[in-house]
Image: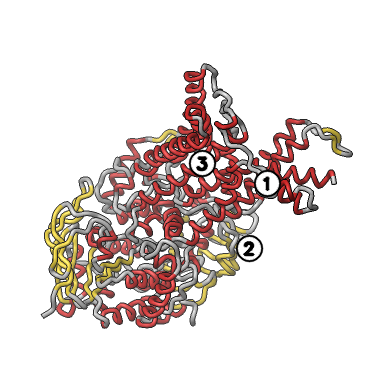
Amino acid sequence: MDNLADIASLLNSTFRISTPLVFAAMAGLFAERSGVIDFGLEGKMLAAAFVAAVGSYFFGSPWMGLLLAILACVSLSMLHGFASVTHKGDQVVSCVAINILMIGLTTALAAAWFGQAGLTPTLTSDQRFLEITLPFADALQDVPIIGLIYSDIISGHYIFVYIAYLSVPIVFWIVFKTSFGLRLRAVGENPSAVDTAGINVFSMRYKALMVNGVLIAFAGAHLSTAVNANFFREMSAGRGYLALAALIFGKWHPKTALIACLLFGFTDALQIRLQGVELPMIGTIPVQLIQAIPYILTVVLLAGFVGKAIAPNAIGQPYIKER
Amino acid sequence: MVSPILELKDINKSFGHVHANKNINLQINKGTIHGIIGENGAGKSTLMSIVFGLYQTDSGTIKINGKEIKLKSPRDSILSGIGMVHQHFMLVENFSVLENIILGFEGELVFGKNLEKAKKDLKNLCDTYKLNIDLESTISDLSVGFRQRVEILKSLYRGAEILILDEPTGVLTPQEVDELFKILRSLKEEGKTIVLITHKLNEIMDLTSEVSVMRQGEMVGHKKTESTNKEDLAEMMVGRSVLLRINKSATKPGNAVFSVRDLVVKDDLDVTRVKNVNLDIHEGEILGLAGVTGNGQTELLEALSGIRKIESGKIQLFNETISNKNNFFDPKLLKEKGLAHVPEDRQRMGLVTDFKAYENLIFGYHHQEPFSKSSVLKEKEILSFSKKVMEEYDVRPRSPNLITSNFSGGNQQKIILSRELNENPKVLLVGQPTRGVDIGAIEFIHQRLIDMRDKGAAILLVSVELEEVLSLSDRIVVMFDGNIVGEKINKDVTDRELGLLMAGVA
């Protein structure tokens, strides 16, 4: 039974670790399906984490923190849109600017407000989100299999974990079953076709970026007001990039992107568990190598191991009417 | 008394310094097919883009059914009953036909009842006009002809009473053109109004009842089609009289100097595009290669000109193997052997469009005297050479220092031709020499090719313009699905026969 419990706890951490990736991948999906590259998921996640932590601290409510994080991320998305949609600037450059700006700004503001470079005060338990025990989780604890799955894997997560996995079918539904989704996909494939169908290309891309801002805010808030009780410097730790990799690896499709996120989450959970564990035949694997597993996996997968990922046709191209 | 459904009055539109439309007046009568003809850059497409709401006028008024309206976006135009089939189709390639058609006019937030209704309405429209389209198929699986029908269906579904078609036949086979014309005639029968933008005089004579001619942004005349002829229209378009059929003497072909045996070529996606092709080109002849775009001509031309590896077979120039499976001569070496290449895609392959004209005029020959010495370019010589050839080839404007992208398509093509022909090549490979080139320049380019032939050059002419192949070639081969499916002596063949070969039917 010890092995089963190990597996359960491994899966439990997989879901938790994948959560910010899932939010970020879904956020990226909206932007990129509309034809706007979003390399700035990383910076926005960092901004959200900072604003959520600070907001919760000042207003005493994590919900207030989340709301402010959403506002911050939507503003950053709009900034990205203003530079790259309205003014047709280079989308990657705009994203890199956001990423670098956020690393510096969060550190500097933390220093100015709290006197500690890149650190916000620890949140009390009513200033942060707590783990939710689902109904009957305790009662079912001892039922074989079901207890393991329900009580040990599904129950006991932060609210963001549930929202994240619920968001995937919703995103799927919006993208493939609504007229908004049809227009979203069209504008990323052939903006001229959308323009000549009497739809404003620019406003479609702004709408997509707005949804993008909301979703990425959840990822940041999850980091600083749920799994951790404060913000620390560069706490997003490359998750934005990893999510983008998952999105590409998942071919810009919500279902496959989810699987990619879970795969990345799983390798991360695995590396945490493997640290210091002695494996038969091999012995102890150096920590550095184990920690590198998710990144090695990313490189291998993206290096074409999974076949050619076909991006939305018009991605990265500002829309200019023919002349 | 016929009433005008669309009236344009004193329309003006400028882009920067270019006055694309000057005081345009136009009346289009209900239930007619109205042709608008003019050279590239004459302002036809701009005018129709204004009517479709893509551009806004600087001044002037637009009336539909006698009522003045403002068209601020394509949506306004669509709602006023105007539909447009663009030259480059406005379709999302990985969407289904249905998705493309309802885009922007879904009528509901979440797909459901209206989608079902749309399907039914579309089936009815397909039946009425015999469009024969499967709504569920993906655009990328459809042939060009069918994609065009989807565009027509899209406009009809959105309630078009006036249908504008911009150069609709450029990419079609003769049979597809026939089908299209049938559809257009049946639309007219149903009372729709059709505006046909073209530079092909045959189509105007075939289809329209009225025709308006544009030249350099101005409307130079309106005619009833029955009271005019091709020569008159051509003269109005160009502003001087033009030769529509080239004068050429009978040919005296010499030895085969360029030969291709069992050639197989793959494209970048590893798909075999040229399958076992055999060709011989003789001194003093033009061999025309006809075919619909995408049947392997591009890959064939690339292989012959030394820019694409071949899978098997061999290519020989003056009995020397220049390409086989393991090894191929690069374009530089081929140039030295007397082979010149005018590539199909002039802006991607033939020119560096951001460079100045004089730079493009010497590329590929820049390392030779007199253009350079000890690897240093000799600007004075280059400029005087450039001025000379620009004069000789009538490149306008004659400014060697102008950035190449600022020249019109025809003049860009003349830059390439003057570069490639200046060395008097013995073998000349030409791809789509007059694509996007206006009538005046076409006449010039054709004459130059004939002159080269008369000087004894062996010329391979690859073109999707059947008329061009027919008017220049001495011998014609047709390519379909990577194979040469027929060879004809030009004087004994009709365009009907060639059309069937091009469609892979005969």
Point out residue B28 in the picture as x, y percentages from the top left corner. Answer: 17, 71
* Residue A141: assigned label: none
Distance (Cα) linking label 2 and label 3: 53 Å
| Mark 2 neighbour density, 10 Å: few (under 14) some (14–19) many (20 or more) | some
Q: Residues within 10 Å of mark 1 (few under 14, many from 20)?
A: many
**Amino acid identity at mark 3:** Ile
Circle 2: residue type: Ser
Left or right of A166 on screen, residue B502: left
The circle on residue B312 is 2
Q: Is residue B331 left or right of residue A151?
A: left
Percent x, y for residue B341?
44, 56
Circles 2 and 3, Cβ within 8 Å, touching? The answer is no
Which of discs 2 and 3 lies nearer the camera? The answer is 3
Give x and y (percent) for residue B117.
Answer: 40, 74
Marks 2 and 3 belong to one chain: no
Q: Residue at x 76, y 49 (%)?
A: A148
Number of the label disc, if any, that sits on residue A155:
1
Regarding mark 1 in the picture, which secondary structure is present there?
Answer: loop
